[in-house]
């Protein structure tokens, strides 16, 4: 059987993390191709429903990227996102899925950090195996 | 504190008298009180004191969380003042609804009461029928409570509840730590309450020691019960996938579920046949109806920060999914994490619109 290739959906804020991912690309930093990026204007614009939908449709992991604390271009979207994600992870914990959702602050200049995050996450999710919800 | 002397078991009458007085005083235009109607005890909106005939706020039954009723009565503007008799979980839900801008309390006099727990509607009604609706179900229940008898019909949500004395009421009817055959106590909980009691010619004096002791003892007893109940692990994923029929009763009865239009009724949950087929292809098999898990995840995200653990969701579930217990624990955990407590204060900001810069650092992976 072919080795399990995790599918990661990344929700990245336009101003920092998406720009960071872009920088990783233009600087030709190598990172796994397992990640599909969805651009949001701000991490604060993330409706938890997006994450649930991704997991239910079979994403093996979800990465949420936003500006570092204090740097959000809408002043405090990332602080609010942090609370929302904290609640979301508590809920997912009931279903054994909390470690499949990661929140990371990645700035526009951190192409390297974006690539490392993806690498780290892909390995971590690979070791967990496929998303159990896919069966449902 | 006003102490009202009792003759055996006539507390319902005494409370009824209080509401009659209130209506007669023209302080309020109407009162919302639980009364015996057709073998059950349900909320009734009454404008004339002659219609206060069968008040019974002590019957162990809670057909609806009345925060929903107060929301109905107050969302459209009105200058007329009304008084509402509410249990602690109803007041707490109401506080959350006010913050969610779905109820107003400016013209509401909240009369709270200590709560000893409730049975399911069907348990209560069938017991009541067995006893020809003679009121003995309430009396037996209270007698049992007074001697710490284990009453198996009490709903799990009520067994777990540690908010059984009313907070944020204008007037509170105190029962804990009292011999219910001797007297009940009516106290002011706010300046408005004080004013009303004065106007009615009733005095207010401080809380008693016996009551404090009784409340602490009761909290302790429930803490132990809670530990026991939480020992039974429930695999929620398994339970939901096998038992949930997606009727959404749990959402319909929840006092907190606040969206004017639920996302699951809107266009985002209408899909084309091609969409269904693509899911079916991808998964090999698509469980239908397909949105059950998404529904539960989303409902939890929406209500946990304000959930008051009243257990109405569980009471309404046709397949007896133990939602009340889940929401009790999860809402407690979530609210503790965000240093919030549903129903505690009107002034505390809803936790998902607030934040602190130095918190939850461990959430970043
Ligand atoms: S989720 Fe259930 S326990 Fe919580 S407030 Fe709504 S009905 Fe009550
Ligand atoms: S009431 Fe019960 S069966 Fe109906 S949607 Fe809620 S959990 Fe599912
Ligand atoms: S703009 Fe990046 S987190 Fe708000």
Image (cartoon, coloured by chain):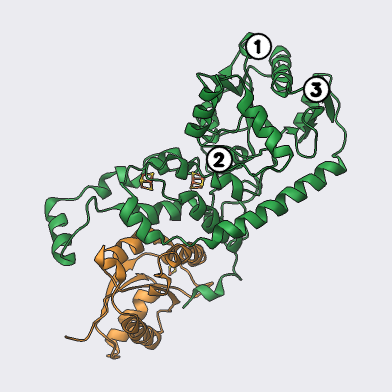
Chain colours: A orange, B green
Ligand 3 is found in which quarter of the picture?
A: bottom left
- How far apart, in angstroms, are the residues tagged by discs 1 and 3? 21 Å
Left or right for A95, reference B110: left
Q: How many marks?
A: 3
Element on which disc 2 rests: loop
Residue sitting at x 78%, y 32%? B188
Q: Position of residue A23 (x, y in %)?
A: 33, 83
Q: Position of residue A92 (x, y in %)?
A: 42, 65
The subunit carrying tag 3 is B
Which quadrant of the figure has residue A61?
A: bottom left
User: Which circle marks residue B153 in the picture?
Assistant: 2
Q: Nearer the viewer, mark 2 or mark 1?
A: 2
Given the current orientation, which residue lies at the most extreme top position?
A: B50
Given the current orientation, which residue lies at the most extreme front position?
A: B130
The subunit carrying tag 2 is B
Q: Nearer the viewer, residue B116 or B309?
A: B116
Q: Position of residue B85 (x, y in %)?
A: 64, 28
Number of other residues with Cα within 10 Å of mark 3, as a class: few under 14, some 14 to 19, many 20 or more: some
Q: Earlier in the sequence, mark 1 or mark 3?
A: 3
Res A43 visible: yes
User: Which circle marks residue B49 in the picture?
Assistant: 1
Left or right for A123, reference B304: left
- How far apart, in angstroms, are the residues tagged by discs 3 and 2? 28 Å
Q: Position of residue B295 (x, y in %)?
A: 35, 52
Residue behind mark 3: B6
- How far apart, in angstroms, are the residues tagged by discs 2 and 1? 34 Å
Callout 2 and callout 1 share a chain: yes
């Amino acid at each position: 059987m072919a080795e399990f290739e995790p599918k990661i959906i990344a929700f990245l804020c336009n101003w920092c993390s998406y720009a960071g991912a872009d920088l990783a690309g233009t600087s030709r930093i190598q990172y796994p191709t397992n990640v599909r990026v969805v651009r949001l204007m701000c991490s604060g614009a993330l409706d938890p429903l997006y994450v649930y939908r991704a997991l239910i449709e079979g994403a093996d992991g979800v990465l949420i990227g936003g500006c570092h604390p204090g740097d959000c271009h809408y002043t405090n979207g990332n602080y609010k996102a942090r609370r929302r994600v904290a609640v979301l992870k508590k809920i997912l914990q009931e279903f054994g899925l909390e470690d499949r959702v990661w929140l990371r602050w990645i700035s526009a200049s951190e192409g390297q950090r974006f690539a490392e995050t993806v690498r780290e996450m892909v390995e971590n999710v690979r070791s967990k195996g496929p998303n159990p919800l896919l069966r449902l | 504190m006003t102490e009202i002397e009792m003759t055996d078991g006539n507390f319902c009458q005494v409370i009824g008298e209080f509401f009659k007085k209130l209506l007669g005083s023209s302080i309020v235009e109407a009162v919302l009180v639980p009364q015996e109607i057709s073998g059950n005890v349900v909320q009734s909106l009454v404008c004339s004191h002659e219609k206060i005939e069968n008040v019974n706020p002590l019957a162990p039954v809670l057909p609806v969380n009345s925060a929903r009723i107060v929301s109905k009565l107050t969302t459209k503007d009105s200058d007329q003042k009304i008084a509402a008799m509410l249990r602690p979980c109803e007041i707490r839900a109401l506080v959350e609804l006010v913050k969610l801008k779905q109820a107003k309390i400016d013209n509401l006099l909240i009369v709270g009461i200590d709560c000893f727990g409730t049975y399911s509607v069907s348990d209560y009604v069938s017991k009541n029928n067995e006893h020809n609706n003679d009121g003995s179900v309430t009396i037996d229940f209270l007698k049992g409570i007074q001697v710490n008898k284990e009453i198996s019909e009490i709903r799990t949500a009520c067994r777990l509840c540690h908010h059984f004395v009313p907070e944020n009421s204008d007037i509170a009817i105190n029962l804990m730590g009292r011999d219910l055959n001797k007297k009940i106590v009516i106290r002011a909980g706010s300046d408005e309450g004080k004013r009303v009691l004065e106007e009615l010619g009733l005095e207010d004096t401080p809380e008693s020691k016996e009551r404090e002791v009784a409340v602490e003892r009761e909290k302790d007893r429930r803490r132990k019960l809670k530990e026991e109940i939480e020992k039974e692990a429930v695999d929620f994923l398994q339970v939901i996938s096998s038992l949930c029929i997606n009727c959404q009763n749990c959402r319909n009865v929840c006092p907190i579920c606040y969206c004017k239009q639920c996302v699951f009724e809107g266009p985002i949950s209408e899909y084309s046949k091609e969409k269904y087929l693509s899911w079916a292809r991808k998964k090999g098999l698509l469980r239908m109806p397909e949105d059950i898990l998404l529904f539960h995840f989303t409902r939890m995200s929406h209500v946990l920060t304000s959930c008051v653990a009243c257990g109405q969701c569980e009471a309404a579930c046709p397949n007896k999914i133990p939602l009340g217990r889940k929401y009790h624990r999860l809402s407690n955990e979530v609210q503790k994490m965000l240093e919030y407590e549903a129903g505690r204060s009107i002034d505390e900001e809803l936790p998902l619109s607030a934040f602190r810069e130095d918190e939850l650092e461990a959430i970043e992976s």
